[in-house]
Image: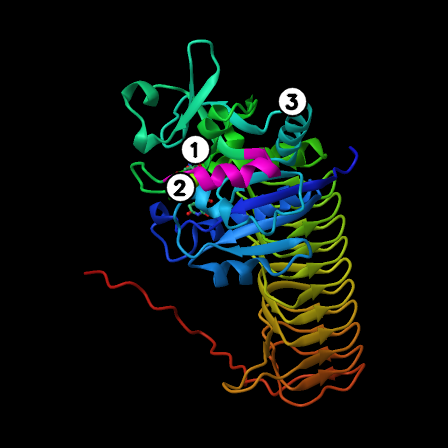
Amino acid sequence: MSEPLHYPDLIVCVLAAGQGKRMRSTLPKVLHKVLGKSMLLHVLHTVEDLQPKGIAVVTGDSSDKVREHIGQPANLAWVLQDKQLGTGHAVRQCEAVCENAADIMIVCGDTPLLTCQTLDALAKAHASGGAEVTFLSAVLADPFGYGRVVRDESGEISAIVEERDADAEQKAISEVTSGIYCVKQNVLFKLLHQVGNKNAQGEYYLPDIVPLALSAGMSVRAIQMHDVNEILGVNDRVQLAAAEAYMQRRIIHDWQREGVTIEQPETVRIEASVRLGTDTTIGAGTQLLGTTCVGDDCHIGPYAVLEDAWLDDHVSIRPFTHIESGTVASHARVGPYAHLRPGAQLDEAVHVGNFVEVKKSVVGRGSKVNHLTYIGDTVMGEECNIGAGTITCNYDGANKFETLIGDRVFVGSDTKLVAPVKLGSGSTVGAGSIITRDVPGNGLTLSARPDQRHVPNWKRPEKNKS
Ligand code: UD1
Ligand code: MG
């Protein structure tokens, strides 16, 4: 592990007020998700790892939605930009919050792929280089949409020109700005106050501080990025999908290096907040979503979907199983084709088999529910065996009721347990029973069965010959 970072004189401004028109959405752009986590949270988590003095987040029209989504981390200040008059105007709103910092870093809320290492490299280059303005640039094969870095004959930076203001010659420049800047606090706001809005969009552009700084005799440095994908700005849903694909590859490589086997990785989805143990294998087509946490030596899939699931070590989740917020203890086996719904808790060495649904129920250690069964609102003890086609009838159309099953209970196939009902420990229920009253422990209970008739010499119907 590398040393934790710490920037006690740096305030990071995160720009998140833009309407995101190109997303064509009612959701604020920065709340769109990349692998299950909003773009803004990706950026904030990355920025938090720098451990700066403070973080200022600029929000606009959708400020309530954005604030509700993020909550209130201790070192985060919300800054309102009433009208979205451009990135320069957005940073200007942070002036009061930034008063006591030596340096200000500016990051866009729509660049979810940024890493902390890159921000750290920028901050270090800014500190050691002595320039008033240091920013990250990248050389892109397709620079469309980004601000171009214009350099003079001697290669010195002279300006940054936005796509919509660029002439044909400038559009051909492949070096772009990432939108990520580090600026000395004592010059940033002076420069911003001089930025005008005479451009194609009528906006106050943050990059315009570059020519202003240069003409005031200050020094401006561009740090070229190695991994140009990191600055991919998401402005529409095509870029959203591209960012997600790139982040997915990165996350999969990270887990592979941590000792997870991933079969046909290009078919697997592992969201950003998922955690995986070593020697676990993820089968093809599997989706691990939300806050899913998987222990060591588990085998999942192929084609399983786990959302907010918790798995201890040595668990086997067989193909086509869907888990929604269930917990599965060690050595348990689930599926194929099983469905664990919220509140499903499988204890150690439980077997849940095909076409079994478990909801808001505890299945005790070593119990087996192997075929075609619904277990809902149930507390089941240890070492039970629940026969095929058993249904806990937990709902009368208005209210839900509990089924309590003791230890070592054997329930015959095709049984209905009409809740509320209790089955005593050691009891056996005959196949095909409809159980409406409590069952005492240790005996056999069965409901009346329809009479069985035998018709001797009966002939099967034959197909008409005509
Ligand atoms: C911006 C940069 C461009 C850079 C690119 C990198 C400007 C003028 N352009 O272009 O040089 O190459 O990012 O991705 O800075 N925002 C506000 N308030 C506003 C306007 C924008 O908070 O009034 C926020 C947005 O929410 C967004 C960020 O600033 O997170 C960037 O704005 P966006 O409209 O995406 O700018 P780009 O066209 O991508
Ligand atoms: Mg953008």
| Residue occupying the point 59% across, 50% down | 56
Front residue of this view, candidates 375 and 58: 58
Mark number displayed over residue 129: 3
Q: Where 16 sits versus 185, above or below? A: below
- Whether disc 1's CB lies below 8 Å from ligand 1 is answered no
Q: Is residue 436 covered in magenta?
A: no
Location of the N terminus by quadrant is: top right
Counting every numbered tag in the picture gives: 3
Nearer the N terminus, badge 1 or badge 3?
Answer: 3
In contact (CB < 8 Å): disc 1 and disc 3: no
Q: Which colour style is shown? A: rainbow
Gap between marks 2 and 3 measured at Cα: 27 Å
User: Which quarter of the picture shows residue 161?
Assistant: top left
- Disc 2 is placed on an element classified as loop
| Residue occupying the point 54% across, 60% down | 67
Nearer the N terminus, badge 2 or badge 3?
Answer: 3
Amino acid at circle 2: Tyr
Residue 2 seen = yes
Residue holding disc 2: 204
The magenta-colored residue range is 181-196
In contact (CB < 8 Å): disc 2 and disc 1: yes
Residue 117 percent location from the top left of the image = 66, 32
Ligand 1: image quarter: top left
Residue 167 percent location from the top left of the image = 28, 23
Residue holding disc 1: 208
